[in-house]
Amino acid sequence: MILVVAEQHGGKLHRASWEAVAFAQELAGDQPVDAIVLGAGPGDSAAELSQAALATIHLVDSALLEPYTADGYTAALQHAIEQLQPTHVVLPHTYRTRDFAPKLAARLDRALITDCIGLTSGERPGFLRPVYQGKLVAEVAAEGAHPHFVSVQIGAYRADAAKRGSTAAAVKPLNVPLDAAAIRQKAEMPFQEAKQAVDLSQAERIVAVGRGIKGQEHIALAEKLASALGAQLAASRPICDSGWLPMERQVGSSGQTVAPKLYVALGISGAIQHVVGMKGARTIVAINKDADAPIFEIADYGIVGDLFEIVPAMIAELEKA
Amino acid sequence: MKIAVCIKQVPTREWQPRIDDSKRGVREQDASFEMNEPDAYALEEALRLREKHGGEVVVCTAGPARASQVLREALARGADRAIHVEHDRLSSITTDSFVIAGALADAVREEKFDLVLTGLQSDDQGAAQTGVILAERLDVPHATIVMDVQVQESVVRVKRELEGGWFQWVQMPLPALLTIQSGINQLRYATLKGIMAAKKKEIRKVMPVSLPAAHSSIVGLDVPRKTKQTQLIPGSPAEAARGLIQKLRDEARVIG
């Protein structure tokens, strides 16, 4: 049996849980796929997930699991896995999974392959994952006894690719012993820093800058192109980390997710943390001096060259009309 | 306060890896190396905590002889001393997180650190596992993707980054391990004085007899498959710019 660890926040299923189900179904072949949902009263999210073609959904309901803590989740899943004996445990590669999954795998001393984007079939499954900033893809085999843990990159599988069942999957409560004293983290409620003043999700056109812009003094050049295109200005994380643009203009897993008609990536290499936030754009333009940059894998149009020559030429061309 | 910072030496971001003849590895001899960027932020945070609370910052790495370069750099930035775990099985840049975390755990455990910091993931393999496995091996509580660290007596309170612009404060007793997110602070660079001082600082070598088993192995490497057919627009900057604008107007119809 393959066990999917679904993620829920306040009874609402994280969309990436469906993507993890799609991956698990591909991995399973003829084997059954179960899921497990943890939390304090996570029943609504289990009901939502029961539409998927799953054998059983195991429900772990405990006040000690809300709010989320790494110690609480590790203990609960350790007991659940010992009871259920899956061959593989599949998780969405969310921030939460990154927080507890390595601890869980270490405690059970089992393999964990993170951030997978696909599978190869064969005698034993090969898990495909990006390495070297997405410049190469590695096929990784898990070593040692089962279960093997696998996390699935967000967006690598489509949520609607998860097979639906003809009848709702059975939801069964699962009792696991939890000790409040063994949970060392005390978590407060999640919050947003400030109301996002810039809502990039509504922008029709976006010009985004990355490390290739080199210095804060060159931001004005990108701004000028944005204004000539009628676009909003955005950035990848390192630009906001350096303080060259405010955090609210960051696109990517830790910033905003955008889906404009046009996305112009200036000097952005295309690290996955950025790409997950913008790959829904209809038309993607990449301008980068490195022809091997991963951004060209998702771009519709590309220019390999020096953005400090190309961007002024684009501005001149737009102003001509 | 006694703080450990675990640092990895990784190939530079500009390096274009070439797959070697085995099709399982890359031509490491072509690479130049640097300090893993998230680890540099972890080091900076440790130096700031020492400035505020006093104590000692010890940098640790598990890697081949060449990795001592990042320890020397960390000492030049202000770390007090260094520990270098060397072993044949730590020589490849593809070493599994369980092996690295196991090697670090044995070297770090006896020092009884109050706080262990490391970057949230490496720029080469990017597994985002080593820090959390290390916490489990040291039997200390942890938090990941940390954007603020406040130490009060025997407790550490941290701001964790969640997805989509959300954050959360989490508190735990010391000793603890934190994985640090890039951008938590502004990095300092080594001064000439720091570089000179680093030459006198200790790098202790640890040569473990055995290391824990790897839990994964790379069985193949390939270049990524393109999901889109990219139209590359050739020509001089002016020609390419003209060609691109024309396509955006007439073909993609995304500008007026």
Image (spheres, helix red, strand yellow):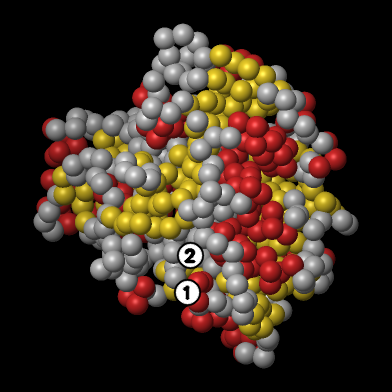
On screen, residue B221 above or below A60: below
Residue B203 % position (x, y): 65, 83
* Residue found 63% across the figure and 47% down from its top: A108
Residue A320 visible somewhere in the drawing = no
Q: Is residue B143 visible?
A: yes
Which residue is outermost to the top? Answer: A167
Q: Position of residue B202 (x, y in %)?
A: 68, 86
Residue B179 occupies quadrant:
bottom right
Report the quarter where the C terminus of chain B lies. top left
User: Disc 2 designates what residue?
Assistant: B95
Circle 2 sits in a helix, a strand or a loop, which is it? loop
Alpha carbons under labels 1 and 2: distance apart: 8 Å
Where B181 sits versus B201, above or below? above
Question: CB atoms at circles 1 and 2 under 8 Å apart?
Answer: yes
Instruction: Name the residue type under label 2.
Output: Thr
Q: Position of residue A196 (x, y in %)?
A: 56, 33
Q: Residues within 10 Å of mark 2 (few under 14, many from 20)?
A: some
Q: Position of B233 compared to B88: left or right?
A: left
Decide: is A37 above or below B11: above
Residue at 58% in and 40% down: A97
Give left or right: position of B169 versus A300: right
Given residues B247 and A218, the one toward you in this image is B247
Residue at figure coordinates x 62%, y 77% from the top left: B209
Residue B27, percent from left and from top: 32, 71
Amino acid type of the residue that numbered disc 1 sits on in the rendered structure: Ser
In-image side of B57 versus B250 (left or right): right
Q: Which mark is residue B91?
A: 1
Mark 1 secondary-structure assignment = loop
